[in-house]
């Protein structure tokens, strides 16, 4: 019976560790579903190769969390399997039946523990408070901060020779009237890539530049295809009109999209 209880405790420990990993990853800016999936993947060692996995390991804090989960998972699963085998070794048929029944009851209780939303909310709250107090793993959720789920996006625009943007100062372009902000510019200078962060209004956009822009998704898509000439100027005015309309809608809704 002691061996059986040991096995159930190992399973319980595994559930709690994955739950802690989920909350920790969620605090670094991941969604709940992504955090839970990646924590379970790391702990079980299945190694799913998805774009989400690449995104997770791109940050040092998340890499440390994943590494700990993988370490604990490799030890925990091996111990659990060894303990399970020992549970039924050298027992009579009646003892084997009794232990199988207790094992089923214990696993059912652990299943309820793992699936209960009430327990999940309570544990998540406790774990998050503890992690906030004893660690420094919280990372801002830039997707939420920048409203990337509300029609806004960050895009990289390659400036070509015939682009409406080429050869003009940022101030002249008046992109802010369209609701677009230029966050940075990548520029090739003498074969070396130069990074210009938060460019000023007198910065001239050159052919070959790559602009990192933030704004309405539709506006950025049109901006990337806008050509020099009267047609490009008309598209700019149309984009300004749409942005003014969006502002009026936001004001009517109390400032919220």
Image (cartoon, grey):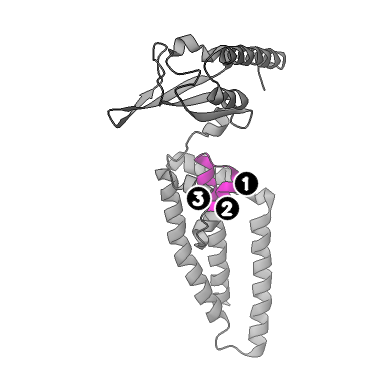
Instruction: Residue 220: say if magenta.
Output: no
Viewer-closest of 95 and 227: 227
Q: Position of residue 158 (x, y in %)?
A: 46, 28
The furthest residue to the right? 252
Please tell me how crowded label 1 is: few (under 14), some (14-19), or many (20+) other residues with Cα within 10 Å: few
User: In the figure, residue 196 lies in which quadrant?
Assistant: top left
Kindly identify which numbered label has been placed on residue 53. Answer: 3
Position of residue 90 relative to residue 213, above or below, is: below
Identify the residue shown where x is 41% and y is 23%.
207
Identify the residue shown where x is 47% and y is 36%.
139
Please tell me how crowded label 2 is: few (under 14), some (14-19), or many (20+) other residues with Cα within 10 Å: some
Position of residue 105 relative to residue 164, above or below, is: below
Please tell me how crowded label 3 is: few (under 14), some (14-19), or many (20+) other residues with Cα within 10 Å: some
Residue that numbered label 2 is attached to = 37
Could you tell me how far apart the alpha carbons at marks 3 and 1 are, in whole angstroms? 27 Å
Q: Earlier in the sequence, mark 3 or mark 2?
A: 2
Could you tell me how far apart the alpha carbons at marks 2 and 1 are, in whole angstroms? 20 Å
Could you tell me how far apart the alpha carbons at marks 3 and 2 are, in whole angstroms? 10 Å
Residue that numbered label 1 is attached to = 122
Helix, strand or loop at mark 2? helix
Helix, strand or loop at mark 1? helix
């Amino acid at each position: 019976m002691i061996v059986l209880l040991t096995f159930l405790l190992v399973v319980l420990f595994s559930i709690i560790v994955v739950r802690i990993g989920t909350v920790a990853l969620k605090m670094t800016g991941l969604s709940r579903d992504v955090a839970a999936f990646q924590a379970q993947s790391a702990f079980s060692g299945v190694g799913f190769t998805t774009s989400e996995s690449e995104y997770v390991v791109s940050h040092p804090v998340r890499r440390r969390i994943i590494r700990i989960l993988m370490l604990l998972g490799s030890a925990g699963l091996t111990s659990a399997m060894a303990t399970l085998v020992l549970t039924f070794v050298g027992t009579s048929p009646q003892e084997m039946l009794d232990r199988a029944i207790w094992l089923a009851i214990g696993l059912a209780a652990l299943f309820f523990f793992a699936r209960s939303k009430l327990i999940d909310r309570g544990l998540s709250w406790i774990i998050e408070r503890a992690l906030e107090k004893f660690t420094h793993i919280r990372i801002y959720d830039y997707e939420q901060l920048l409203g990337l789920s509300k029609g806004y996006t960050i895009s990289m625009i390659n400036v070509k020779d015939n682009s409406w943007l080429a050869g003009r100062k940022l101030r002249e372009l008046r992109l802010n009237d369209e609701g677009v902000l230029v966050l940075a510019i990548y520029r090739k200078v003498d074969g070396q890539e130069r990074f210009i962060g938060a460019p000023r209004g007198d910065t001239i956009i050159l052919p070959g530049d790559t602009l990192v822009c933030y704004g309405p998704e539709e506006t950025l898509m049109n901006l990337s295809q806008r050509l020099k000439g009267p047609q490009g100027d008309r598209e700019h005015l149309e984009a300004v009109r749409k942005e003014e309309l969006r502002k009026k809608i936001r004001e009517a809704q109390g400032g919220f999209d």
